[in-house]
Image: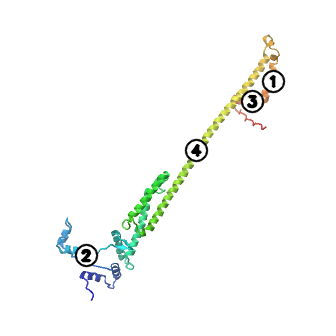
Amino acid sequence: GRPRAPPAEASLHEALAPRADSLDGTRAALAALFPNRTLAAVRAPDAVDLAELASASGLPDADSPFAGSFAASAQRALGLLQPKAVGGAPLSGELLAAALHGLVAQLQAGAPRGLSLTATVYALMREWASAAVTSGRRAFSRVAPPLTEMRGQLAVALPAASLELLLRNATKAAYEAFLARLASVADADDPAAWLQPYAEQLRIAVEGEAARRRLAHEHAAALAQERAVSRRLRDEAGASRDEIERLLALRDASSRLERWRGLAADLAMFALAAGSAVLPGGGGLNRLGPALRVAPALFSSLFAWRVIRRPVPALLRSLGHALHLPGCAPAPPAAADAT
């Protein structure tokens, strides 16, 4: 016949047997989760054992029934231990503990149907991988701040080589944070295949952030160049304006000097003509001959010719401007005749 189970294991089988009550679903789920069940009985500690457990050593007497039963159960458990794996990937203690915690939460929530350790582990792995991607993106932003922050705006003003170095360091920090978050479920030297989509997601996010910063850097460089050109053009325009003003001042000074020279020549001619007319005759002057006698008429004719050449309004304006009389502006220069 069928071998009789030990009393402890028989008690476990009886505890998981259906009883036609509301917990039958939970019992069936536990039996499906743990198809190979082994139970070892441990004697309850007595007062002496409890006192020794609370002592500094924390170890009970090795000859006590409690210590003997505990050592036997521990030896049996160690003999049955083997690495847990889901989908061929070994489970770490942290992931297995989190999966069991999730299973207990599902059992307490009253969802025994479809309870699966594999599904729970995969759900945890996906959750941790998504959190790792978030950690990687945050690590990137800590090294290369976003453009909405002042540090990010200062970073795009750096030289191109410095910006590239900053982005490389930020990318390295992002992948290190990603793998550190998944250290319990993935080997940094040989990451599992299931992590590849999440690593690709992080790569796309990091490259997008880096591209935005490079584009902002190019825009800042173009804007700085445009400002430099505008400033240079303003400086050149100011220098040209100063040169034009200097040339206009020289022209005005030359024009005033020319007017004074013309006025002086007219006055000298008039004085010679008047002086020749009133000079007394006889003596040595008579010996100069006819040239001296015709001098008054000659100088008068030259003076009249100079006056006739210049229009009377222009002459009066020149005289008034030379004497700084109000309302006497110099006449504009006449255009040269095209011949």
Q: Is residue 291 left or right of residue 134?
A: right
Q: Check the picture and name the quadrant holding the C terminus.
A: top right
Distance between the alpha carbons at the discs numbered 3 and 1: 20 Å
Residue beneath disc 3: 316
Callout 2: SS: helix
Q: Are marks 3 and 1 in contact (CB under 8 Å)?
A: no
Classed neighbour count for the residue bearing mark 2: other residues with Cα under 10 Å, few (<14), some (14–19), many (≥20): some
Percent position of residue 105, x then y: 36, 74
Pick whichever of labels 3 and 2 is earlier in the sequence.
2
Q: Nearer the viewer, residue 140 or 193?
A: 193
Q: Nearer the viewer, mark 2 or mark 4?
A: 2
Q: Nearer the viewer, residue 68 or 308?
A: 68
Q: Are marks 2 and 1 in contact (CB under 8 Å)?
A: no
Callout 3: SS: helix
Report the amino acid beneath label 3: Leu
Q: Are marks 3 and 2 in contact (CB under 8 Å)?
A: no
Residue beneath disc 2: 76
Q: Nearer the viewer, mark 2 or mark 1?
A: 2
Residue beneath disc 4: 232
Note whether 275 is above or below 89 in the view shown: above
Classed neighbour count for the residue bearing mark 1: other residues with Cα under 10 Å, few (<14), some (14–19), many (≥20): some
Pick whichever of labels 3 and 4 is earlier in the sequence.
4
Report the amino acid beneath label 2: Arg
